[in-house]
């Protein structure tokens, strides 16, 4: 009977053990966190085994210490039991022994075991099993009981099984947590990378700093809490800190807040600027700085304060600051690194905007004087004219067009540096006479304009003229030269919103030329006579291109002959315009307009092409070699394209070398002599010669003679007119100079036999003039080729 009961009891225990194991196994599938696992083991499993206490320890990463993670009663208020030792070394006590050896142990009487470490509630017996997964000790389950020899092999068997299942689950949960942590890290890294790219993109595209700061804050706020955030810029020239972007408790303050010089020295921001290093402060650190006198407390004391300084350029520096008033929120070194990156982006954005503003200023202002340039003047005229529709009747705008008298002669005689200083001084004087609402602009060279808005009476313009004359009345000392300034002024008015800015400029310009032609220091108002001239000018400008495209231009040819024998050696090609409506238009009416508008380039190329056609035709007919001189604008000597264009003409018409000669006037000064020299040298393989016309009538002839490879000089007609019975000393001087420089000389405007006879007694090579032939058509020119004139 006794045996039967023992067997029954053993079976019952075994069944209970299996039930515990089965239930624990099924529960493991539902438990996802370590806390749930430990609670289940220390409450459900151990309680069913009849244990009074149980502690679970996990090994740390070093495998030297065991940390208590759960114990019976920790998660249940009804159970107040806690183990006294929260951390146990692998070399301490029975628990440390099991962890070190990886071997389970049952001790019936712990008082006899020297390894036992007594707890708050000393035990009599102990059962301790290791948590092992793949030969690695993860931790220990330690159970104690106040009765000696309480634990049995059955207890050991079931707790070992529980430990085995728990170890596998521990590994699974740790693996999943590790993966989740890795995924979170990757997500955070991707979020950070995307945010940094967004910030970099914002910086690149930033055109408005206020919008840039707001967008920047939105991105920063997604990476770190920035409900209290500000950006401040410090201008060291005026010693003021400008809080350009402020967010307090998540609410943006749109108005800029400036901190005066008096307040500035007491702020943490100023201390940050001075120290020029990142400051990551907790409340105690911040208070310590206050106690040290580094700065004073402004507002509430924050829990965490992070500030980063930055420098935009030599003048502008700044700070970016985040503050936390939440005891649970403290900024980290990672936040510091992020804000440092952001500060660099702010620095670049500000520097780029300042550079853009500087470029915009340069684009709209004259570099020498700092005045508005033509583009800015025209924009302001446009806007002002549009406003005329909304102003009081009788209101108008006035444009004063100024040209400084004798400026070119000052430049030529004293040099460009003195000329520049002269202009600067005049501008400073005139600037003091204009109203704050007026625009004083430099249009180019020595031409300036004053745009006077909202004129209600013409006397306002008269008063402005008086102020200008008074300012320029006294001579100016410019680089030790005493110079008298005066200006010719043309004035035009705009009275309707239908007016055009460019027309107002044209009208004032036309009035200025009338003033200039009347003498120094004159003033002229635009009138109907000038309006008619402008109309004629505009008509010719519009018709020029049409004339080129429809072959309305014809070349006439005036022979160039030897002074000694009157043999024809070539022709000068002179243009004639047969306008379909106006009839014959003389060159002096359309050439200056073409030069002013830039149409002279296309016109010259068209005339060179016509000349080349005639030369090619004459050679096809078997006539002897002649060269044709074509007048061209000095504008061609500003681009190497001209070399290619002339070479193309030679190739197109198969011209003999030396067929073309290019003639420029001395008054059409070539600005870039180095480039002009390259162009002339580029034409040398074609044996194209350069002829200087009107020699002696300009300012810089000798400079040309020394710096340009000129081949031929033309003595101006005004000198030939004075050849009466004896030679003109000026003509003799020119011929002597030409002979010393090995130049050929052409005397133009020979109209009497007396003039020719005198020239025959000189070293002059060639001549042209009405005495021998007026300019004739190409057909008539053929008849002059083969016989002396």
Image (cartoon, rainbow, N blue to C red):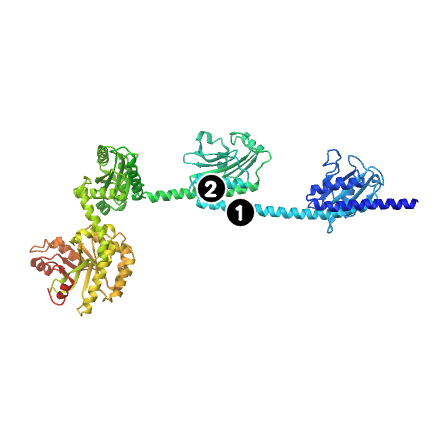
Which of the labelled discs sits on residue 346, or is there none? 2
Extreme-right residue of the structure = 1
Instruction: Provide residue 269's location: percent of width, then percent of height.
Output: 49, 34
Instruction: Provide residue 723's location: percent of width, then percent of height.
Output: 9, 55
| Location of residue 436 (image quadrant) | top left
Residues 680 and 391: in front is: 391
Q: Left or right? Give the position of 682 relative to 562.
A: right
At 57% from the left and 38% from the top, the residue drawn is 331
Which of the labelled discs sits on residue 573, or is there none? none
Figure label count: 2
Depth check, mark 1 against mark 2: the one in front is 1
The earlier-in-sequence mark between 1 and 2 is 1
Residue 433, visible in the rendered structure: no
Mark 1 → mark 2, Cα distance in angstroms: 18 Å
Which of the labelled discs sits on residue 193, or is there none? 1
Q: What element does badge 2 sit on?
A: helix
Instruction: Provide residue 605's location: percent of width, then percent of height.
Output: 24, 58
Number of other residues with Cα within 10 Å of mark 2, as a class: few under 14, some 14 to 19, many 20 or more? many
Residue 100, visible in the rendered structure: yes
Badges 1 and 2: C-beta atoms under 8 Å apart? Answer: no
Q: Quadrant of the N terminus?
A: top right
| Location of residue 768 (image quadrant) | bottom left
Number of other residues with Cα within 10 Å of mark 1, as a class: few under 14, some 14 to 19, many 20 or more? few
Q: Left or right? Give the position of 291 relative to 233.
A: right
Q: What element does badge 1 sit on?
A: helix
| Location of residue 497 (image quadrant) | top left
Residues 660 and 73: in front is: 73
């Amino acid at each position: 009977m006794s045996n039967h009961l023992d067997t029954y009891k053993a079976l019952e225990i075994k069944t209970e053990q299996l039930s515990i194991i089965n239930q624990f196994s099924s529960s493991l599938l539902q438990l996802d966190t370590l806390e749930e696992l430990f609670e289940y083991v220390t409450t459900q499993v151990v309680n069913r085994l009849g244990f009074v206490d149980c502690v679970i320890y996990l090994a740390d990463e070093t495998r030297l210490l065991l940390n208590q993670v759960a114990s019976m009663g920790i998660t249940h208020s009804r159970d107040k039991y806690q183990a006294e030792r929260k951390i146990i070394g692998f070399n301490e006590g029975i628990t440390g022994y099991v962890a070190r050896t990886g071997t389970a142990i049952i001790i019936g009487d712990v008082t006899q075991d020297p390894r036992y470490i007594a707890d708050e509630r000393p035990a009599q017996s102990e059962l301790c099993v290791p948590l092992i997964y793949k030969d690695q000790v993860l931790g220990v389950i330690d159970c104690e009981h106040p009765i000696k020899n309480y634990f049995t092999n059955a207890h050991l068997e079931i707790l070992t099984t529980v430990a085995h299942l728990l170890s596998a689950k521990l590994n699974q949960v740790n693996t999943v947590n590790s993966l989740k942590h890795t995924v979170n890290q990757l997500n955070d890294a991707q979020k950070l990378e995307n945010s940094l790219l967004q910030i970099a993109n914002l910086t690149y595209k930033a055109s408005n700093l206020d919008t840039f700061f707001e967008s920047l804050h939105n991105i920063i706020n997604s990476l770190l809490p920035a409900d209290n955030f500000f950006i401040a810029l410090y201008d060291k020239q005026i010693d003021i800190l400008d809080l350009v972007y402020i967010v307090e408790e998540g609410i943006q303050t749109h108005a800029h807040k400036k901190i005066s010089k008096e307040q500035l020295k007491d702020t943490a921001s100023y201390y940050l600027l001075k120290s020029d290093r990142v400051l990551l402060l907790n409340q105690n650190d911040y208070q310590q700085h206050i106690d040290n006198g580094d700065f004073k407390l402004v507002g509430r004391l924050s829990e965490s304060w992070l500030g980063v300084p930055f420098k935009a350029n030599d003048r502008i520096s700044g700070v970016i600051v985040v503050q936390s008033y939440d005891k649970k929120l403290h900024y980290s070194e990672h936040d510091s690194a992020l804000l440092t990156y952001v500060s660099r982006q702010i620095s670049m954005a500000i520097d780029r905007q300042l550079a853009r503003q500087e470029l915009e200023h340069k684009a709209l202002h004259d570099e020498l004087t700092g005045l508005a340039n033509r583009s800015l003047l025209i924009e302001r005229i446009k806007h002002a004219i549009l406003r005329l529709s909304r102003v009081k009747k009788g209101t108008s705008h006035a444009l004063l067009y100024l040209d400084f008298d004798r400026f070119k002669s000052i430049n030529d005689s004293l040099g460009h540096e003195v000329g520049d200083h002269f202009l600067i001084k005049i501008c400073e004087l005139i600037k003091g006479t204009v109203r704050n609402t007026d625009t004083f602009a430099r249009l180019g060279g020595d031409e300036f304009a004053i745009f006077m808005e909202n004129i209600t009476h013409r006397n306002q313009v008269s008063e402005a003229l008086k102020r200008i004359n008074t300012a320029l009345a006294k001579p100016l000392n410019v680089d030790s030269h005493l110079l008298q300034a005066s200006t010719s002024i043309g004035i035009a008015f705009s009275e309707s919103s239908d007016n055009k800015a460019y027309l107002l400029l044209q009208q004032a310009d036309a009035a200025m030329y009338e003033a200039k032609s009347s003498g120094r220091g004159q003033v002229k108002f635009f009138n109907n006579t000038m309006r008619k001239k402008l109309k004629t000018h505009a008509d010719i400008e519009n018709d020029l291109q049409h004339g080129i495209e429809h072959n309305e231009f014809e070349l006439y040819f005036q022979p160039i002959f030897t002074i000694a024998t009157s043999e024809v050696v070539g022709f000068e090609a002179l243009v004639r315009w047969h306008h379909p409506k106006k009839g014959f238009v003389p060159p002096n009416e359309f050439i200056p307009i073409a030069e002013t508008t830039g149409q002279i380039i296309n016109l010259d190329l068209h005339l060179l092409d016509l000349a080349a056609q005639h030369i090619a035709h004459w050679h096809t007919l078997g006539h002897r070699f002649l060269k044709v001189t074509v007048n061209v604008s000095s504008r061609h000597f500003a681009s190497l394209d001209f070399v290619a264009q002339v070479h193309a003409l030679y190739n197109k018409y198969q011209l003999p070398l030396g067929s073309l000669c290019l003639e420029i006037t001395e008054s059409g000064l070539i600005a870039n002599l180095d480039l002009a020299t390259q162009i002339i040298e580029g034409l040398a393989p074609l044996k194209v010669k350069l002829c200087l016309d009107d020699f002696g009538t300009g300012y810089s002839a000798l400079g040309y003679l020394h710096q340009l490879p000129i081949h031929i000089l033309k003595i101006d007609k005004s000198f030939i007119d004075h050849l009466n019975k004896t030679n003109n000393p000026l003509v003799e001087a020119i011929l002597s100079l030409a002979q010393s420089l090995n130049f050929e000389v052409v005397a133009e405007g020979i109209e009497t036999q007396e003039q020719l006879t005198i020239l025959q007694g000189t070293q002059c090579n060639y001549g042209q003039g009405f005495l021998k032939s007026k300019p004739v058509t190409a057909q008539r020119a053929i008849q002059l080729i083969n016989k002396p004139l």
